[in-house]
Image (cartoon, rainbow, N blue to C red):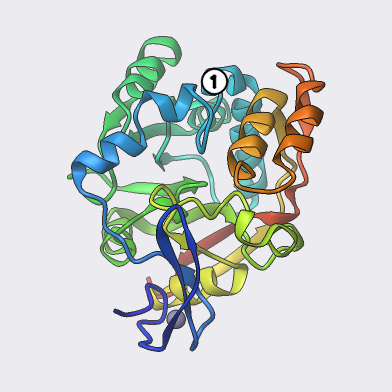
């Protein structure tokens, strides 16, 4: 078995989560789960329950619509000093709320999403061009000026071939925007194995700023800009996540009492210290 980032062979088991080993590469420190879900399992992971039944996914994803549209607009503005609006591909778009934010800022959007309900929702309610599928399997003939992966890169089970595909459909001078969780963050250190992002087989690669850079460098990308997004979360999603992640913890009873007094549908600021975005361009054009 090789490290998914540096291909190193010095791999140790750090701990077991959901029955899957969380592995650490001794050479580059990358954490990952060595697992390739079958197409059937991908359908199960991103079933309607992922978006509507809480647990590892969302309590009700469509309730976060306005927040996510705002986030798309926020990113479109952030990157406007590096690129003029053109064609954007959103990999793992869900219903396309973030993509809609980019369209509001002049981008022409396409989204890829495994969940059929989300695809239909985005097409019907937002008029978006969404395709059902995964980056690993989908065939794309068009090229894009910008490819975005918002909280998606940790879920990709075939990183190398997916990024080969991403490179091949990026126009010269095109950019990649990645938002992901930072396993070197204080939040991650504090929660240890209970950190929300350790959620195999849904998540499989647990990046830090350093290991994401290392991986992208091997794919011939260089860092253009990086930052920490301002993030809000609906109280429902926060509660569902906290309870799901800490169900094995000895504090569970105490925490469920606390979360019970938080009202539903309230937008709460989220400590985004463990989330970052990074913008990359191809090193050689
Ligand atoms: Zn490695």
Q: Which residue is mark 1?
A: 60
Give 267 or 65, whichever is nearer the viewer. 267
- Quarter of the render that holds ligand 1: bottom left
What is the x, y in percent for residue 137? 20, 47
On screen, residue 92 above or below 174 = above
Q: How many marks?
A: 1
| Residue occupying image coordinates x 63% and y 54% | 195
Q: Where, by quadrant of the figure, is residue 181 drawn? A: bottom right
On screen, residue 41 above or below 125 = below
Q: Is residue 10 left or right of residue 139?
A: right
Would residue 138 be visible to someone looking at this image?
A: no
Q: Is residue 192 left or right of residue 6?
A: right
| Residue occupying image coordinates x 56% and y 69% | 223
Element at label 1: loop
| Residue occupying image coordinates x 68% and y 33% | 238
Give 90 or 273, whichever is nearer the viewer. 273
On screen, residue 211 above or below 88 = below
Q: Quadrant of the C terminus?
A: bottom left
Q: Residues within 10 Å of mark 1 (few under 14, many from 20)?
A: some
What is the x, y in percent for residue 224? 59, 65
Determine whether the beta carbon of the residue marked 1 sits less than 8 angstroms from the nearest atom of ligand 1.
no
Q: Quadrant of the N terminus?
A: bottom left
Would residue 204 be visible to someone looking at this image?
A: yes
What is the x, y in percent for residue 145? 41, 48
What is the x, y in percent for residue 90? 42, 40
């Amino acid at each position: 078995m090789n490290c998914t980032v540096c291909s190193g062979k010095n791999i140790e088991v750090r701990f077991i989560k959901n029955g899957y080993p969380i592995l650490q590469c001794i050479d580059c420190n990358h954490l990952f789960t060595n697992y390739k879900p079958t197409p059937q399992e991908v359908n199960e992971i991103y079933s309607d329950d992922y978006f509507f039944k809480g647990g590892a996914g969302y309590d009700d994803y469509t309730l976060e619509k306005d927040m996510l549209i705002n986030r798309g607009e926020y990113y479109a503005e952030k990157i406007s000093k590096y690129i003029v609006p053109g064609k954007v591909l959103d990999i793992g778009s869900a219903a396309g709320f973030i993509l809609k934010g980019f369209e509001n800022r002049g981008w022409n959007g396409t989204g890829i999403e495994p969940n059929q309900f989300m695809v239909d929702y985005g097409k019907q309610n937002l008029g978006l061009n969404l395709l059902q599928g995964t980056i690993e399997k989908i065939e794309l003939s068009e090229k894009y000026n910008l490819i975005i992966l918002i909280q998606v890169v940790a879920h990709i089970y075939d990183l190398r071939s997916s990024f080969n595909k991403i490179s091949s459909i990026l126009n010269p001078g095109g950019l990649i925007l990645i938002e992901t969780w930072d396993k070197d963050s204080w939040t991650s250190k504090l929660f240890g194995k209970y950190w929300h992002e350790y959620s195999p087989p849904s998540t499989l690669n647990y990046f830090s700023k350093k290991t994401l850079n290392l991986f992208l460098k091997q794919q011939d990308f260089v860092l253009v800009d990086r930052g920490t997004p301002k993030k809000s979360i609906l109280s429902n999603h926060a509660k569902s996540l906290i309870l799901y992640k800490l169900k094995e913890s000895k504090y569970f009873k105490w925490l469920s009492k606390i979360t019970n007094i938080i009202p539903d549908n309230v937008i709460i600021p989220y400590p985004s210290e463990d989330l970052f975005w990074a913008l990359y361009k191809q090193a050689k054009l």
